Image (cartoon, rainbow, N blue to C red):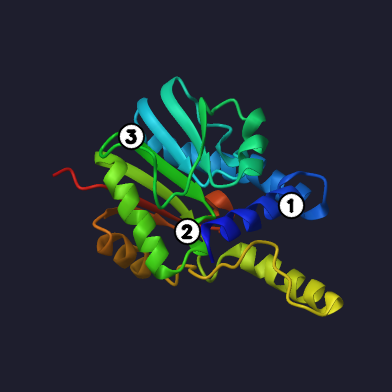
Amino acid sequence: MSLEDEQAAWEHHWQSTGKANSLVGRIASVVRSQILSRAVRHYADLYFGDEGVFIECGCGTGQSSARIPAGRRRVVALDLSLEALRQTGHVTSFTDRVQADIRRLPFPDGSVAGIWNLGVMEHFDAAAAAEILSEFRRVLRPGAAAILFWPPEFGSSRWVLAPVERLIGWRRGRPFHVFPDEVNRLRSKRHAAEILRAAGLLPSAIDFSARDAFIHMVVVARRPAA
C-alpha cells in the first residue's frame, strides 16, 4: 500500500469511527477516556521525565493522552491523518500537532525525551515495525523510553471485537473490521523483547494487566545509554 493509500484509509477510519457519533465511536471514546488515559498517565509518570519533547507517534483522537500533564514538557501529537489531528483539538495536554509518517520522523537524532503510542504497531508488518522502531531509536535521547501499547493475540479487545466483526461481516456479506488490518499482534512477552532487541532497543518492562483492561501488552523500550 502506498503512503497516499495508507493516509486515505486512516482518514476514512477517523471520519467514520473516531468521533463519538456512532455506537463504535461512543464505546471507543469511553474506553480511551476512562481506562486507557489512566494507564497512559501511570506509565508516563514511571518512565518519562519532567521536561523535553515527548511525542505520541500515531495519536489518533488523542483521548488516551488527556491525563498527561504538559508542565515543562513539549507534548506533540503526531499522526499521518489530518482528521485524527483535528480531533485532538480538545486535548489540552498537547502543545504541538504534527502531520508525519512515523517511519520518517521530522526530528533530529537524539532530540526526543520520550515516545508513546496505543494500538499502532500492530497495523504494520514485521519489516515496517522494525523500521519504525529503528526510527524511534534514532530520535530518542540515550536512555530515553518509548512506551508502546501493543495489542497481543490474546488481548481482551479481540475477545469482544472478533465476534462483532464476524456478525457484521456475515450480515453485510463481506469481511468487516472495526480497525484497519492488525497484521502484527504480539504472541508473547518473549516475542516483544525479541522485536525490541532486533531494533537496537533495550526492553525495560513488558506488562499485560488489568490496568488497561487487558487490551494491550505495554512494552517499554529504552535507547541504550551508550
Q: Which residue lies furthest to the left in this view?
A: 226
Disc 2 and disc 3 in contact, CB within 8 angstroms:
no
At label 1, counting other C-alpha atoms closer than 10 Å, the crowd grade (few under 14, some 14-19, many 20 or more) is some
Residue 197, image x, y percentages: 26, 61
Tell me the CA gap for discs 1 and 3: 31 Å
Quarter of the image with the N terminus is: bottom right
Q: What amino acid does circle 1 point to?
A: Thr
Can residue 61 be seen from the camera position used here?
no
Name the secondary structure under disc 2: helix
Q: In this view, does 57 lie to the left or right of 167?
A: left
Residue 149, image x, y percentages: 48, 53
Quarter of the image with the C terminus is: top left
Front one among 61 and 35: 61
Q: Is residue 35 above or below residue 203?
A: above
Choose the circle earlier in sequence order: 1 or 3.
Answer: 1
At label 3, counting other C-alpha atoms closer than 10 Å, the crowd grade (few under 14, some 14-19, many 20 or more) is many
Q: What amino acid does circle 2 point to?
A: Met
Q: Is residue 203 left or right of residue 98?
A: left
Name the secondary structure under disc 1: helix
> In the picture, residue 83 is in which quadrant?
top right
Tell me the CA gap for discs 2 and 1: 19 Å
Residue that badge 2 annotates: 121
Q: Residue 113 has which mark? A: 3
Q: Is residue 193 above or below residue 66?
A: below
Q: In this view, does 116 lie to the left or right of 30?
A: left
Tell me the CA gap for discs 2 and 3: 20 Å
At label 2, counting other C-alpha atoms closer than 10 Å, the crowd grade (few under 14, some 14-19, many 20 or more) is many
Q: What amino acid does circle 3 point to?
A: Ala
Residue that badge 1 annotates: 17
Residue 76, image x, y percentages: 48, 33
Q: Residue furthest right?
A: 171
